[in-house]
Each structure stands twice: as structure tokens, then as C-alpha cells.
Amino acid sequence: MFTIDLNGKTYRAEEDMNLLHFLRDELHITSLKNGCSEGACGACSVLVDDKATRACLLTLARVSGRKIMTVEGLPEREKEVYVRAFAEAGAVQCGFCIPGMTISAKALLDKKPDPEPREIKEAIRGNLCRCTGYVKIEQTILLAAKMLRGEAQPKPSTEAGIGMSFWRIDTAGKVLGTGQYADDMHMEGMLYGAVLRTKYPRALVKRIDISAARSQPGVEAVMTADDVPGERYSGFITRDWPVLVAAGEETRYVGHALALVAARSRRIAREALGLVKVDYEELDPVTTTAFALSPDAPSIHSKGNVLSTTQINRGNAVEAVTKSAYVVTNRYVTPHTEHAFMEPESSLAVPQGDGGIAVHAGSQSVYEDRRGIASILGLPLEKVRVVGKLVGGAFGGKEDLSVQHHAALLAMGTRKPVKLTLTRQESLLVHPKRHPMEIEMTTACDDQGKLTAVISRIIADTGAYASLGGPVLQRACTHVAGPYRVPNADIKGWAVYTNNPPAGAFRGFGVPQACFACETNMDLLAEKVGISPWEIRYRNALEPGKTMATGQIAGDDTAFKETLLAVRDIYQASHFSGIASSIKNTGLGVGVPDTGRVKIVVRNRKVLILTSAACVGQGLATILTQVISETTGLAPEQIEVGDPDTSLTPDAGTTTASRQTLFTGEAARQAALLLAEDMKHAPLAQLEEEEYLGEYTAQTDPLNSTKPNPVNHTAYSYATHVVLLDDQGRVKKIVAVHDVGRAINPKAVEGQIEGGVAMGLGYALREKFPLEKGVPTARFGALGLFRSTDMPEVEVILIGKNTSSLGYGAKGVGEIASIPTAPAMNSAYHRYDGKVRLSLPLADTPYEKA
Ligand code: FES
Ligand code: FES
């Protein structure tokens, strides 16, 4: 018998088990999260006898007789302090790490009521956060300390207009753990799903024998490809990804599903996987794009190994290069990168009485999920309801179906609710990564440093499946000339299938790779001309009315030069400084239908905002509250926001391409204008159950349209990052200047940029996702993610000169925040030691991992 005192109550258990599983699965204490189950992330932090400890590394036997506290057990006063401190600092994004951070903060402040900043960094060193860059979390802890000492009492603003750092409305739920992520859900009689995946990236599956697994006590269903009632292949644009691989077919990567199990416990489900017998004929995997493109390579898909190509031609680049005064040519190589969102994929599927199904998931788009699930189940769309839960980070990695369809298949097969949550290791195996790219880049200029031409050839390893590989390659090609006036461009790219993990959407969508090549070449060109890296950027900067390499004319909102001017002094005054700039589109663009939608319903004298647009941590519900408040004059407490739900909320498209603040923000403004008009004639009380639909669709032109100056994207953001190194080559400070159009909530924008910089630092200096013959070998703790103690000072400067009423002037910031950091770092190290580095992560830095 094991006894623990949890949050002041005594609990007993007959059998020993892992403490995290006991608390979450048996007692349904869900503030602590399962981010990795291997002691690497700190999301499961609890206090054991007042010491912050990771529950996933403990068993009941080890804590029996001891006092355990989770966030649920904090004294009421402290709950209020932490909620207010997190809100005031603007430190909550996806929220998955936050209860664990709170526990670490409490452990520190109980001992050290007036901590030094360095002690705060140390206290949360074991807690990973992928969203915030830790800056605002550290500020939260300093503020909480002051509040607990009675020296501060921040209060929420009673106004929520545009440009105000209004407290995020999801703060309390995320700090106290009452907000629900999919894996926090529990239903009586619920089954647990598990997925058998192939052992080999490329193998012929000869036979799958599920008989032993099926007869295992506690197992309620074992399913294979034969049990898929509808379309067995899924995918956004190209449906090439089988939901389950059938006997007689080849596997294409190690994340491939062969069989699904539903059982009465997580343990039984996983044990049953071991009873499924699979006969394989192992085949040599195709692991390089060079081999995939060679005539000897086997075809990974029936149409061959090239998923897509992109071409951009303006002027005569070849001739312009030959006539140029200076030319730089290099070949750049960038790696696979793992999103490392803190919440592993999870979904709960529940059969409905009408023969349909409801699927709960932390999704980037409930409507895309619904389309995919309905097609796989062979059900009409109206029989599939997808409900969005909190998303514990996504960064593009939750665009594809990962667990939703498998949970749905098992639920339909058993007619019972089934929850399927990936282990961290499975999550690493399954979802698409950032594309590795090889980029040949020629940049040429005249004797004054004015760009004359860019020639680029980009090969992207898109792995086993299309996912969003085609559009990612396209964005790499459209952005490889950078935020500059380039009169001649010859750009071509190929997305190539291999047996490596699929590559797809990842913050930046092909632009981080392209920017690394473009910006490094810019520095080397400046060297040849004899001007500074800052100067060559300024001389060539896009400004309103100037033409991009794609032919689009930069709009009046373009404030790229302003970002350069903001860093000029600090860049020039520092000994080992580096600089890089970037451009990034907002919205899908290139003629693809792209619409934001919001419905406002007046209910109980309040307005309820309904939209399917997912908050993946960026704070969309808060932004929409501000938009509605600004437009109607309603106070924030009169505004509520519903969860994404295909049965209730209009389709606002995917949270991708940095689009939601502009697209769904503008849709909210349109809906609010209609409401405001009615409010001129009637008080809210008389508008009960009135509905107002707002919609915004961007009109864009396809790439290579015949127009001389096509509008490929409705808006572009610009940024310049400056990196300052100390004498030992460590990063002392990063200054990130962003043209965001107009900041709807400056603190939220700053937080996104700080987090983006942290991600960019990892990409530049340390993050790796190594493969051995196509098989990922890294564990979560070995990815090289930056921890609090690794972070340098980050200063964010926002440039907001967009006076457009469209979306109140907002432009996307989610992706560009992490794009220029890596080349800026490369620029700084080049200045530091004179070496030219052409691959990521950068070699020969103090951050390089053995
Ligand atoms: S879940 Fe325990 S450290 Fe990650
Ligand atoms: S807020 Fe920390 S992981 Fe998202």
C-alpha cells in the first residue's frame, strides 16, 4: 500500500506506478503535463516536500508518505498572485509549460522571497518552454516575488482597445491548469489507443498478423488497413499518405502506421502492440535527395521522386551576373528541425448516436481535420464534428492529421470513446519536420553594391509524403532574394521525396532556409564591395513602390528601412555584431482561396465571438476581444470567445502563414461593424440572439501570373535582427526589430518575437534532428533546445506605421520572428573569427554540441 498527501488530502494505491500517470490518469489531476515522460521538459513538475521535482521520474514507492503539491493545491492568494503576474508580464502563450513553471517559481520564492534574476533562470532551468524564450516568464517570477512581498499589485485594464497590452483572457486557465488540452480529457468507459509503426523506413510489408493481439484480455479492437471504411490516403493537396499501410505495400518512413489497438488501459494497448506480428522484407531506404533524383533510385511514389518544382524568372539574371562588378556564389545546407512543441499530439474521439463522430483535438484547423477524418471514415461532413482543445504549441507541426484519424477509426470500430496520445518519442517519429534544403545561391551587384541579380537552385528533402512540401518550396523560392530590390532573378526549386521523415510546415515555411543563404551571401558581397553589411542592406532595401524579385510592388506599409535604421547605431558601435534581415508573407496568397470568418452572437447581454481559427499560443482570443471592443466600444467583460467547433463556428481557415490576426482579425472587425451599426439603434439587451457574420477574403494572384506586377500576397512583414557577441564568442544580446504593421497587443507581439528569437537561436547554434538511414535517433532531451540559462538578453523594437484599416493595420509576426536570427548569428561569427559558415547549426561556436 502506498500513501501520499496530495494537496492536503490523503490518497492510497495498492500497486506501485509512475507518479505522473497516477496523478493524471487515476486522480485526473491535470495541471501537470506529460511533455516527455523522460525528465527532459519539466512540464510534470510537482513539489515533493517543498522541492520542485519531475513527477515522470518518480514512482509511488519513492514518494509514499511524502507531501506532494500541484498547482491545484496552491493557497488561493498564491493562485491569484501567479495568475496576475503571468498576465501582467504577458508570459503565457500555448500554456503547456506554465503550471510546471509555476511550481518551479513557488519552490524558489518559498525559499528566496527576493531572488536575483540569475537565480530565477536557474530555478526554471529544468522547465522547457518553446514559445516565450523565457523572457517574460522570468519577469513574471520577479513580479510574483514583489507581489508576495506586498510591493506590487497589478490590476487588469478595464479597457481592451487596439494597441493596448490587455491581459490575455486565457491566462488563468493556463496557469491553474483548468484549461483543457486533449489529453486532459477523460470519459467514463473511455478506451486508450495505440499505434504500431513500421520498424523500417522502407520495407515491403508481407503479412500483418493481429490474432494474438486481438485475443489479449482488455483489448477491444485491433485494426489494419482492411478496416478503413473510406479513403485510405490523406493529405492537404496531394493525397499520398496512407492512414494505415496494407500487407503487400511498401512503408515509406518509420512513422508509418501498420495497426491500431484500442484497449481498456494505456498499458494493455501498448502491450498488445508487441503481439502484432509483421513480416517485412527490408529494402534499402532512399535517404538523400541526390540519390532520389538519380536514375538508379527506386520510385518512392508512382509518379516518381519529384513532388513539385517552382520557377521564378525576371529579367535576364545570367547576363546580369556576367556584367556585374561583384559576384558571390555559395552552396548552403540546412538540416531537419523538430518543432518540439511541448504538447505531444492527442485526440479523443467519441461516437455519436446518429452514426457520426465527435473528435476533440488540439488542432491548427478543425475544418481541415474534419475534411480528412470524414473522407477516411467514409462519412458525410455533417456526421463529423471536430472540437478544438487548447493547443500546446504547434509551429506548423500540427497541420497534418497525426492522431485524430486513428482515434476516430478506433472509436468507430469499438463504438466507444477512444483517446490516443502519442508518446514523445512517437511524436518525434510521426509529424513532419522542417525541410532540409541545399541551396546554391549566386548574388551579384554593381560597384556601388546595388544588387543586379540573384540566381538560386533549391533542393528540398520533402521526405516520405507531400504534406505541405510544395508550398514550402514555393515560399523558399519566392523569398530567397530577400527583402531587396532585385531586377533580375532566376530561381528554381525541387521538392524531392525520400524515405526520410516527411517535411512540411514549420514556422517560417521554407523562408528560414532561404534567408540563411540570401543573407550570408549579402554579407560576403558587402565584403567584396568594401561596404558594411548594414550598408549593403540599406542600399538595396525594399521600400514603398519598389519591385520585389517576384514582381510584386511593395505596399505603402513597407517599413523595412525603418528596421535597419533602428539598429544602425548598435550594430555599428559593437565589435562583434552580426546583422540579417527578412521578409515574410502574411496569408496563403498566390491565388489560393484564403478567408477569415467570425460570427458574433449576442447572448445574455454579452457578445460571443465564434470562429474556427485556432489559438496555437499566439493569443487569438485576446486579439479578437480587442478588435471587437475597439470597434463596438463594448467593455472586455461583455465579450466572450468560444472554442473552435465545426458544429458552431464558421470556417476561418488554418492557423498558418502568420495569417490569423490579419484575416480573422479583419473578419471580426467586419462583424463588429455590423453589430456597432445595430447598437446605434438598440441596446445590447434588445439584440439578444442576433448574429453578425464577418468575412475577409484576400484577392491574390498566382505565382508567375501574366500580370507585370502581380499581388502574390496581401501583406508582407519585415524584420532585422542584430546579434552581439562577447569576447568569448557567446551571445550577449539580440536586438530584434520588426515591422508588424500595427501591434494590436504590444506585449503579446513582443512575447511572440522573444520566443521566435529563442527558436532561431536553437536553429542557428544547436538544434539537430539526426537520422541514421532515415531513422531519427534523437530523444527529446537531446534536440539542443535552448533553456532559460542559455538565453541572452533580447530587446524587441516594434515598428508600426501601417495606417490601413484592414485588420487595424496588423501584419503577421508569428513566423518572421524566428527567421533572421540564424543568418544574423552567422554574420556575427564571421565578424568574430573570419570564418565562412555555410551550414546550420553553425560549426565552431561555443554552443556546438559534441
Ligand atoms: S514529462 Fe516529466 S520532465 Fe517531461
Ligand atoms: S508557453 Fe511555454 S511551451 Fe508554450
Image (tube, rainbow, N blue to C red):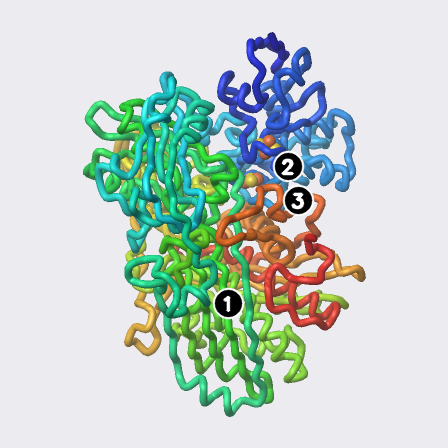
What's the mark number on residue 787?
A: 3
Residue 591 image-quadrant placement:
bottom left
Question: Marks 3 and 2: CB-CB under 8 Å?
Answer: no
Type of residue at label 1?
Glu
Look at the image and tell me in which quarter the N terminus lies: top right
Residue 548 image-quadrant placement:
bottom left
Q: Residue at x 51, y 35 (%)?
A: 158
Q: Within 8 Å of ligand 2, the CB of disc 2?
A: no
Whole-percent x and y of residue 698?
Answer: 32, 59
Mark closest to the chain's N terminus, 2 or 1? 2
Mark closest to the chain's N terminus, 3 or 1? 1
Type of residue at label 2?
Asn
- Spatial separation of the CA atoms under disc 3 and disc 2: 8 Å
Q: Secondary structure at mark 3?
A: loop
Residue behind mark 2:
127
- Vertical side of 458 occupied by 144: above or below: above
Q: Quadrant of ligand 2?
A: top right
